[in-house]
Image (cartoon, grey):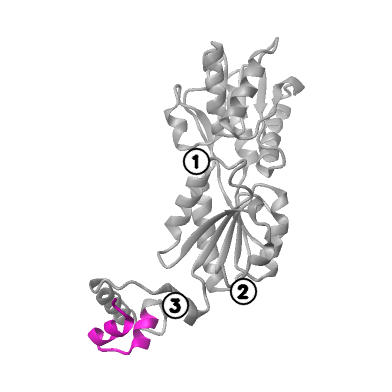
């Protein structure tokens, strides 16, 4: 097994210089660092992270915590989050993925285990965990859910504005009877998207019929069930906003099963712009929430926090965008 002492002999420098160079120390000149990195690559050097951790007192582990992995977190949401993080996280770090609802002992969340933590927060119930991490002094960035605390680094998208833009577009196409399939109860995203739906209807002076508010939980199955119920109303809506794309796909299948043509008889709008949205038949009109971008930016901010503990926390917004495809028809 190649060690830093072997690299040092080939490079003609001390093993301390090699160690500093491979850890990106500013004490080592760039030309020297580049030469040592090239020699290490040619010798197929693989760092011993266990030894490195003992020396540096770091774990080289980043924790990614969702509110829950089993409830309310779709596979596409999970994949986009990890994709964004991997773009920003270098190979020196390991990423571990957890659900906050499965952490039964917060005392196990210690600086010795995590160099930094990303929380993909979906619920106010995450606050106890978030403040435990903050109290422990672990560098922390909260993604996805807007916080009121300016002392925590926060990267979010404005779901409410994104939904309003989508509904405004459907109104411009002549729709006046709108329904919503809501997200998982207790999730901040569900509340924000519902509020954006109502903002648009109120702005256009359209009625808010209780019959047009259908319960969902972000699953395909709940989208199917809610859409089936909406189609059975005596006066069904002409357009339905689904609080995520998974439910929109379920709703589209319910329309097909009920013989209601999309978009000729009922128009559908989703939220997230998951990979499958463009491949549904017809292709789904949706609001793009750039989870990968949010995760990548949040990871970059976390790395900065780990390197500069005194960095002033910020709240950063990543813009949503309406993606017009084929599921909204003009009336």
As measured in the structure, the alpha-carbon distance from the residue carrying label 2 to the one carrying label 1 is 35 Å
Q: Determine whether the residue tagged by mark 1 lies in a helix, strand or loop.
A: helix
Q: Give the side of residue 71 with respect to residue 91, left or right.
A: right
Q: Main secondary structure of the magenta part?
A: helix
Q: Confirm whether the magenta stretch covers residue 205.
A: no
As measured in the structure, the alpha-carbon distance from the residue carrying label 3 to the one carrying label 2 is 25 Å
Q: Which region is colored magenta?
A: 1-21
- Judging by the rendered image, the residue that carries numbered circle 2 is 310
Q: Are marks 2 and 1 in contact (CB under 8 Å)?
A: no
- Judging by the rendered image, the residue that carries numbered circle 1 is 76
Q: Give the side of residue 103 with respect to residue 274, left or right.
A: right
Looking at the image, which is closer to me, 141 or 133? 133
The circle on residue 52 is 3
Would you identify the image quadrant in which residue 139 lies? bottom right
Residue name at image x 70 percent, y 39 percent: 191
Looking at the image, which is closer to me, 108 or 254? 108
What percent of the width, then of the height, locates residue 253?
Answer: 52, 21
Q: Determine whether the residue tagged by mark 3 lies in a helix, strand or loop.
A: helix
Residue 5 in view in this figure: yes
């Amino acid at each position: 097994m190649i060690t830093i002492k072997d690299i040092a002999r080939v490079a003609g420098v001390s093993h301390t210089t090699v160690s500093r160079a491979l850890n990106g120390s500013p004490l080592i000149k760039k030309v020297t660092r580049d030469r040592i990195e090239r020699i290490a690559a040619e010798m197929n050097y693989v760092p011993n992270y266990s030894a490195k951790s003992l020396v540096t007192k770091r774990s080289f582990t980043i924790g990614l915590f969702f509110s829950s992995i089993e409830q309310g977190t779709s596979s596409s949401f999970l994949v986009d989050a990890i994709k964004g993080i991997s773009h920003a996280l270098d190979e020196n770090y390991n990423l571990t993925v957890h659900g906050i609802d499965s952490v039964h002992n917060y005392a196990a969340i210690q600086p010795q285990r995590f160099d930094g933590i990303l929380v993909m927060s979906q619920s106010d119930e995450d606050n106890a965990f978030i403040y435990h991490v903050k109290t422990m002094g672990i560098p922390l960035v909260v993604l996805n859910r807007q916080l009121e605390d300016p002392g925590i680094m926060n990267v979010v998208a404005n779901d409410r504005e994104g939904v309003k833009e989508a509904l405004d577009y459907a109104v411009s196409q002549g729709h006046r009877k709108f329904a919503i399939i809501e997200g998982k109860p207790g999730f901040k995203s569900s509340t924000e998207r519902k509020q954006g739906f109502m903002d648009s209807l109120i702005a256009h002076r359209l009625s808010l019929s209780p019959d047009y508010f259908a319960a969902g939980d972000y699953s395909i199955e709940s989208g199917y069930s809610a859409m089936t119920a909406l189609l059975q109303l005596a006066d069904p809506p002409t357009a339905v906003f689904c609080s995520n794309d998974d439910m929109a796909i379920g709703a589209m299948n319910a329309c097909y099963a009920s013989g209601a043509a999309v978009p000729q008889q009922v128009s559908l709008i989703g939220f997230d712009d998951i990979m499958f949205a463009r491949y549904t038949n017809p292709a789904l009109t949706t609001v793009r929430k750039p989870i990968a971008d949010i995760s990548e930016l949040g990871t970059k901010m976390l790395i900065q926090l780990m390197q500069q503990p005194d960095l002033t926390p910020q709240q950063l917004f990543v813009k949503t965008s309406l993606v017009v495809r084929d599921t909204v028809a003009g009336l």
